[in-house]
Structures are given as structure tokens and as C-alpha cells.
Amino acid sequence: MKMKKYYASSIPEAMKQVRAELGEDAVILNSKVVIKKKFFGMVKKKSFEVVAGVDAMEPNQVAPAPTPAVLPVAPKNNTRLQEITDAIQAKIHQDQIPQDAAVLEDTSMSEELRKEIADLKSLMQSMHKKTTQAQYPDELLPFIEYLRQQELSEELITTIGDELFMHFKEASEINFSQCKMITKNLLRKKLEVLQVGGLSYERKYINVLGPTGVGKTTTIAKMAARAVLEKKKKIGFITTDTYRIAAIEQLKTYAGLLQAPVEIAYNATDFEQAVQKLSHLDLVFIDTAGRNYKEVKYVEDLQRLIKFDDQAESYLVLAMTTKEKDMENIVDQFKQVPIEKFIFTKMDETNSIGTMINLMIKYNKGLAYYTNDQEVPEDIEEADLEAVLNLFFQGEER
């Protein structure tokens, strides 16, 4: 085996050097961070050391002819993907990338290391997509592309694709309807363990959380209207959204139509007093301030203001028009809050709902409602597993 050591400012840059010199058959044998000291140790410079190797062919050796196969698998791409994954894990185990978030914040190189991880993840996803194209027969590729257009995660697409391929090998053919049925069954198994459905009506306080602009106040009005009209509940409202006068006025308008009292809480003392005033009601809906919940301090402020106890159930509202990564950042910030289920809004403004399924599975959270317009109380649907699965294929193209 021919081996060589490479130095670069990043792993992707090192891999470019490896591919350029050793070719696509090269294997990453080892990688690590190297800190070089200059000017008597006062200046530190970080680089990455990568050891790569490639099997050298003997002068008289003839490359074997490729063996025909039913499926054109791409071992090179799979190998490259595994090599990158191994490189990340190796650096973590070598304690060169701190695993604890608090440690990352206190590490002078944390931003650079996070960027390296992001670059590697992006490269892995790109190579994974290319691998998928070569991994499955042509008959499956249109359906695989449909899953990708629906923005289903690559991990789920691989799971589904592997299952579809098993059926394809047995029957030597497969159509869209069969692919759809198999996919539904797989997603159903993953989602049926989660709680799906609206308010339990077992707890008095309904905390509705979420960032600004997702439609929390309108969603609360829709939930409250159903509680009054369908369940004959006596309800009230508490709003902590004192940053926007329009939000308070909007909630008061809805409350007036439902003949329900509204209390405004500017601080924790106001909130306690509001709870006492509304203690005689069946349900109290709590409208929280829309803030940039990608910042942890706003979540901490919320925890100090309202209660998350066994008398309350909490729902996180997210808009389907938001980028999935931004949604993940928001959910991550709420990890200390006992979120019961998600509520997704603005369903009518997107053609794909894969993100909704991705988040439910990733965070093990159920779904309470999804909304598709501004009308109160009409434009809200209580979540149902079969309805969600049907929504996923609503825009199918045969």
C-alpha cells in the first residue's frame, strides 16, 4: 500500500489533496488536529493531519474485469462516506472536539471546530445523496426523488429505499402505489408510538409556546373556540405577550367573541394573580411572547414567568415555512421545557411536509394540530396519524 501524510487547514481541503494525488480509491487511515506553536509558543496555529493510503497495483497485475450485478452499487462512495464519519468520530474520541455544549462555549477554538463539523456534515450529505442515486435501480429513483422533494430526511429515505429494494428484488418490479404503501407502513410504525391528537382536557392550563410570526395567537383562538363550541368548556386567557400591543388587542377580540375573560401578565406576580382570578374556569389558555427562541435566555425568562407543572400541558408552535435547521435550533432550546406535542402552522404555504415528520421522529414528540389558514375556528385540524400519512402523498405525481 502506498501511504502519504497530508496537512491542510480543514478536513475537506485535506481530502481534496488526497483525491488529487491518490485517486478515488484512497482510504483515510488516520486524522488528527495538529497545533503548531510560533514565536516562543505565544501564537498557536491549528491544522489537520490526514494519513491516507491506496493499494498499489503490481506492474504485471491486470485489473480484474467487473462482475455483472443486478444492482449497480457504489462501494467507493459508501467507503468515502464511512471514512468521513470515522474521521469525525476519531476526533471526538481524541477529545479534540468537545462533546459538551458548555465546554464548546468556553473553548477558544470552538467556532472553528464547529465550522469544521458543519463542513464535514455538508460533505457527508452531498456524498450520501450521490450514493443513493447509484445504490438503487432506475425503477426506484423517481420515488426516491419524490421523498427527497417532500424534504424527508436522508436517514429515513435510506431506510425506505432499502425496504423498497428488498421488495423489488423479490418481485423484479414495483410501481408507485406499491412504493407508497410500503412507505406508509414504515412511517406508520415510526409514528404510531408518539402521541397524536389535540387537547387532553385533563389539565387546566394550556401553554402555547413558539417564536414570533408563527401564528400562536390565532392558533390559540382556534383551539379555544373548539373547546367552547364542541366541548362546552368555560375558558379564559392569560397573555404574557406584552411586547406587542397588537397581539393583546387581537386576543381581546377573540376573547370577546367567545365571552371569555383575559388577563395580562407583565411579570411573575401578575401571572400568579391572573391564575387566581381564573381558577374557577375549566381551561386557561396562556399566550406567550413571540421571541427569538434560538437564544436560550428567552427560554429561561419564560420558565421564570409561567409554570410548567402537572396542571399544565405545553405545546410548541412551529411554522412550516421555517427552515428545518432553524426549527431544530428552536426545539433544542426548549429541551428543558416539558413540551407535550408540536403544532404546525401555515401548512397551506408549503408543498412538502417531510420536515414535520422528521421533527416528530427526531425529537420523539407527537402532533396536536396543524393549521392551514387564518379563519377561526375553521382552519385547524386535530392531528390524526392516517391523515398525516395521506398529507405526505397529497402532491404525488405518478
Image: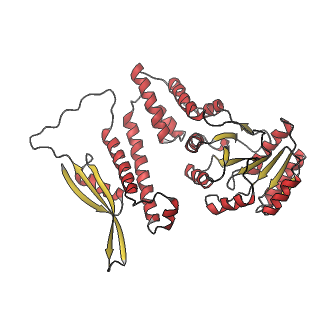
Residue farthest right in this picture: 259
Residue farthest left in this picture: 60
Residue found 23% across the figure and 32% down from its top: 66
**Residue 245 versus residue 352 in the image, above or below:** below
Q: How does the figure colour the protein chain or chains?
A: secondary structure
Numbered circles on residues, count:
0
Is 15 left or right of 176, judged from the image as shown? left
Residue found 43% across the figure and 56% down from its top: 117
Residue found 27% across the figure and 51% down from its top: 29
Residue 373 percent across, percent down from the top left: 73, 43
Residue farthest top in this picture: 171
Residue 353 percent across, percent down from the top left: 60, 40
Q: Is residue 352 visible?
A: no
**Residue 163 versus residue 263 in the image, above or below:** above
**Residue 302 versus residue 373 in the image, above or below:** below
Residue farthest bottom in this picture: 40
The residue nearer to you, when weighing 11 against 135, is 11
**Residue 56 versus residue 240 in the image, above or below:** above
Residue 269 percent across, percent down from the top left: 81, 63
Q: Is residue 332 visible?
A: yes
The residue nearer to you, when weighing 189 against 115, is 189
The residue nearer to you, when weighing 329 against 233, is 233
Is 218 left or right of 195, judged from the image as shown? right
Residue 170 percent across, percent down from the top left: 40, 20
Is 149 left or right of 214, judged from the image as shown? left
The residue nearer to you, when weighing 99 against 386, is 99
